[in-house]
Image (cartoon, grey):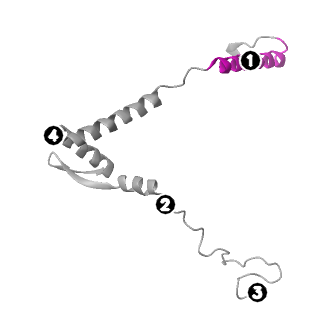
Amino acid sequence: MTSEHDGRDKKSGRFLKGTSPNPKGRPRRPRTVGAAISSAFNEKVQVNEHGRRRKITKLEAAAKQIANQSASGDPRSVKLGMELAQKAEERQSRASAGPTQLSETDSQIAARLVARLRQTILEENDGHEPNPADTK
């Protein structure tokens, strides 16, 4: 009682054991240009440094080449190196800056929320302040 062309049971319409309804599987997502470039820069290459062989990423190798060329006085490499270093420092300072100051409106909303939470806690504790030692 099986249908030969689609691998289904004629009675129930279910696929038989071992028969996949999608034999080719889900199609792969097309890779973006950014993903392809990122993947290429993360590949490892062998380099000789101080007489020793090491494996580093292509991104690290490119950064070292820019730094070495700018140190030798190449004006284009100096400009590119400085721009990249400045962007990296800006990203790092933004990441380590931490939270920013709240606006006046946000401060008022936060104060009302804290007051409402305190009121809820007081009501749950029958009007008694919670003992901080009890929470430990």
Q: Are marks 2 and 4 in contact (CB under 8 Å)?
A: no
Residue 66 in sight here: yes
Choose the circle earlier in sequence order: 3 or 4.
3
Question: How many angstroms separate mark 1 from mark 4 (CA)?
Answer: 61 Å
Say few, some or many: other residues with alpha carbon within 10 Å of mark 1 (under 14 / 14 to 19 / 20 or more): few
Disc 2 target residue = 31
For the point 45% across and 28% down, the residue is 96
Amino acid at pointer 3:
Thr
Residue with the mark numbered 3:
2
For marks 3 and 4, give the CA distance.
76 Å
Please tell me which residue is depicted at 62% across the width and 20% down the height of the picture.
Answer: 103
The disc placed on residue 47 is none
Residue 99 lies left or right of residue 10; in this view the side is left
Mark identifier at residue 112: 1
Q: Position of residue 119 (x, y in %)?
A: 80, 16
Foreground disc of the pair 3, 2: 2
Q: Helix, strand or loop at disc 3?
A: loop
Residue type at mark 1 is Arg
User: How many residues crowd mark 2 within 10 Å: few (<14), some (14–19), many (20+)?
Assistant: few
Q: What residue is pinned by disc 4?
A: 72
Q: Earlier in the sequence, mark 1 or mark 4?
A: 4
User: Which region is colored magenta?
Assistant: 103-127
